[in-house]
């Protein structure tokens, strides 16, 4: 069911995020809500921009290209994050649209990003996606390959990897997956953790999330 007032939903959610952060002994300012705006039109996003929301996540390059350039003209300080799987051949377009790409998950994509960075002289901030549940249908580097992949991206390809992202399996408890991601981040010296969605963000905050990706809690079920 669609939420009639996304701004009111956001305010309530921001209050809850702050409360969970305090309960975990954390500064609420260290947990940013990334509003997952997939399938949402400008009429639903604009009020959130007026409210002061600045971090948004999109799953598809084509959809982002259709709606965000005009929104960015009106709100140039927004941060647009790619949170869906990125095809390697879409890397050039992603560079034009996104400030952050959260789903670097394979060699071919890392190489495509490195080529585009060399060509343009710039690069979005990058997160490596880890497939903590080792699910074949999902993107993400496998946990036992994460350290080597992160090192290759940062050292050999000189990519600006600043964090990790995961999507735990829909069944079972999310906590072990969030804990695993935090552990990988710690041993690689990465500060940012994008983990937790509308159903499990309290656990993610407890286990160190710096960014929670929330969509249905703000807009309603798609």
Image: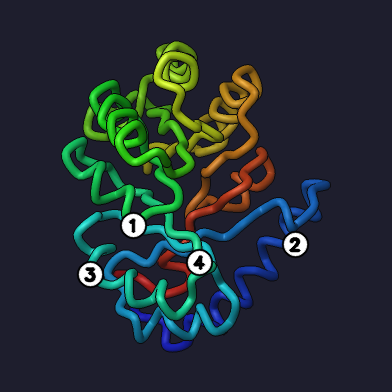
Mark 4 crowdedness (10 Å alpha carbons): few <14, some 14-19, many ≥20: some
Lower position in the chain sequence, tag 1 or tag 4: 4
Up/down of 174 relative to 60, above or below: above
Q: Secondary structure at mark 4?
A: loop
Secondary-structure class at tag 2: helix
Foreground residue among 76 and 166: 76
Q: CA distance from mark 1 to mark 4?
A: 11 Å
Vertical placement of 124 versus 134: above or below? Answer: below
Alpha carbon distance from label 1 to label 2:
33 Å
Q: Earlier in the sequence, mark 3 or mark 1?
A: 3
Mark linked to residue 19: 2
Q: Quarter of the image holding residue 96?
A: bottom left
Give the mark toward the camera: 3 or 2.
3
- The residue at which mark 3 appears reads as 66
Circle nearer the viewer, 1 or 2: 1
Q: Quadrant of residue 128?
A: top left
- Crowd around label 1: few <14 · some 14–19 · many ≥20 (10 Å): many
Disc 3: CA contacts within 10 A as few (<14), some (14-19) or many (>=20):
few
Asked if the residue at tag 4 contacts the one at tag 3, i.e. Cβ–Cβ closer than 8 Å, the answer is no
- Residue sitting farthest toward the left: 89
Q: Secondary structure at mark 3?
A: helix
Front position in the image: 190 or 21: 190
Circle nearer the N terminus (3, 2):
2
Decide: few, some or many residues near mark 2? Use Cα within 10 Å; few <14, some 14-19, many ≥20: some
* Residue drawn at 50 percent across, 32 percent down: 160
Give the residue number, with chain letter if any, for mark 1. Answer: 97
Mark 4 or 2: the one toward you: 4
Question: Residue at position x 48%, y 81% from top?
Answer: 6
Q: Residue at x 62, y 44 (%)?
A: 209
Q: Position of residue 94 (x, y in %)?
A: 29, 49
Q: CA distance from mark 3 to mark 2?
A: 36 Å
């Amino acid at each position: 069911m669609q939420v009639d007032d996304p701004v009111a939903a956001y305010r309530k959610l921001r209050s809850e995020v702050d409360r969970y952060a305090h309960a975990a002994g954390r500064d609420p300012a260290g947990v940013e809500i990334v509003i997952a705006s997939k399938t949402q039109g400008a009429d639903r996003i604009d009020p959130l921009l007026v409210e002061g929301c600045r971090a948004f996540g999109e799953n598809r390059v084509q959809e982002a290209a259709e709606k965000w350039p005009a929104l960015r003209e009106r709100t140039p300080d927004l941060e647009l994050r790619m949170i869906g799987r990125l095809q390697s051949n879409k890397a050039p377009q992603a560079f034009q649209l996104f400030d952050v790409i959260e789903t670097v998950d394979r060699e071919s994509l890392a190489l495509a990003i490195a080529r585009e960075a060399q060509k343009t002289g710039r690069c979005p901030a990058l997160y490596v996606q880890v497939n903590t549940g080792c699910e074949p249908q999902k993107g993400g580097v496998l946990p036992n390959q994460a350290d080597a992949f992160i090192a290759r991206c940062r050292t050999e390809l000189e990519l600006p990897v600043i964090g990790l992202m995961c999507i735990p399996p829909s069944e079972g408890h999310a906590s072990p997956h969030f804990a695993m991601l935090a552990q990988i981040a710690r041993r690689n010296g990465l500060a940012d953790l994008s983990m937790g969605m509308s159903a499990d963000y309290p656990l993610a905050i407890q286990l160190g999330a710096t960014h929670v990706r929330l969509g249905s809690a703000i807009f309603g079920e798609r």
